Image (cartoon, rainbow, N blue to C red):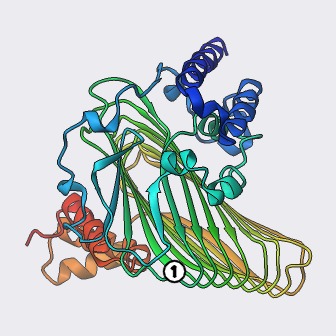
Amino acid sequence: MENTLDIKKLFLSHFADFENSLNGGKAKPVHELRRSAISKFSELQFPTTRDEEWKYTNISPLLKHDFVPVQKSAEDYEFEVNHFLFDKMEHSLIVFINGMYSSGLSKIKDLPKGVVVKSLSEAIKEDNPIVKRHLGQYADFKNHIFTSLSAAFVQDGAFIYIPDGKVVEDPIHILFLTISDNQKILVQPRNLFVAGKNSQFTIIEHFASTSDEDIYFTNSVTEIVTEENAFVDHLKVQEESKKAFHIGRMDVHQERNSNFVSHLISFGAAISRNDFNSRFNDDGGESMLNGLFLIEGTQLFDAHTLIDHAKPHCNSHEHYKGILMGSSRGVFNGKVIVRKNAQKTNAFQENNNIILSDDALVNTKPQLEIFANDVKCSHGATIGQLDNDAMFYLKTRGIGVDRAKAILIHAFASDVVRYIKVNAVREYIESILKKKFHEDQS
């Protein structure tokens, strides 16, 4: 308890320094959000394994470090980002170094008239009305300490606005690159994506680092609004340092007949916690959540999802898969709520896991809370090892044990990966799987 109090005091001290550095920025409306959030942060407690929502995720290793906010500007770094571009895709690229926008490394292609792709800090300075209306309205900072920490330090991140009727054909790649220089830094990107009526676009949130040994803390919050008939395809690829900590939250607000698709692919971080919350606010919405995590050593991956069917005639489909090696730990807690008036709901949820060692462990808890009677809902979870009959079949065809194992793992993961529409990203994920399990060997 004493250690967590010290950590809170440290963050409160950092906020005082941050506030003093804002100068005229304190007069902006967003600073009211910051002040409210830091007040809540001071009241809330860091979660422990005694909290039901954190029962299997011990964050005490994170709290042992004194993480400090980044001091350098993104422009202070000279860096080549081609290595992180998924087979050098030609598309709009917006780059953040340690959570701060880098204009020199970003490249915005020709976009339809009215489409806005820029840094959140610039949008705040401009008093953008879309930001004023939506920022901080969906990610609950009053009851979640890491979200309150994010809201208190709102400064930069990606802001994307697609006006009514506009279609952006090429994906927008947002690269969050951490260069810690052996310092224990706190990185807090804050993102806001708003899709107007009848609009369509694809986003790639990509978290990476320049070293697999750096210890740092990424606390990311993304808010997404899908207006009537909008379609948003969202990909998150998390491949940060194996010694880093990643707390990610995404809140989606869906209007009538909107369609939201999410793909979460996670390989990195010592501890990776991912909270996903989606709410249907009108009839006819559709949502698909796909996830794949591959962990080894002592890594811990935790996915907590909540799909709120608050309105009738909405469909949701959720499928998360895990591959665990070493003494890694996996957690899946998926909840679907069907409210009283949400008739004609169709909700499917499934979590499948393959354990490749005796010491790996998964805790899975799919949940349905149904208060309507005319619905079609199902859920399920499996934890197992590779199919011995399938292994035997492949070996009888002259395929070695390692390659047979790789083929089966690739097939297991493909149920998630095949839904990724961006070819270069899908091929990138498949190449990681092949490399990890030596599938290319003869």
Residue 216 in percent (x, y) is at 40, 31
Residue 187 in percent (x, y) is at 45, 36
Instruction: Locate the N terminus and report the quarter of the image it occupies.
Output: top right
Residue 25 in percent (x, y) is at 59, 33
The one nearer the camera, 214 or 170, is 170
- How many labels were placed on the picture? 1
Q: What is the quadrant of residue 101 in the picture?
A: top left
Vertical order, 327 against 109 (above or below): above
Residue pointed to by mark 1 = 200
**Residue 84 is at least partly visible in this image:** yes
Please report the residue visible at 40 percent of the width from the left and 48 percent of the height from the top.
358
Q: Tell me the element at label 1.
A: strand
The one nearer the camera, 39 or 278, is 39
Vertical order, 123 against 224 (above or below): above
Please report the residue visible at 14 percent of the width from the left and 71 percent of the height from the top.
400
Residue 182 in percent (x, y) is at 28, 24
Crowd tier of the residue under label 1, counting other residues whose Cα lies within 10 Å: few below 14, some 14–19, many 20 or above: many
The one nearer the camera, 411 or 260, is 260
Three-letter code for the amino acid on which mark 1 is drawn: Gln
**Residue 366 is at least partly visible in this image:** no
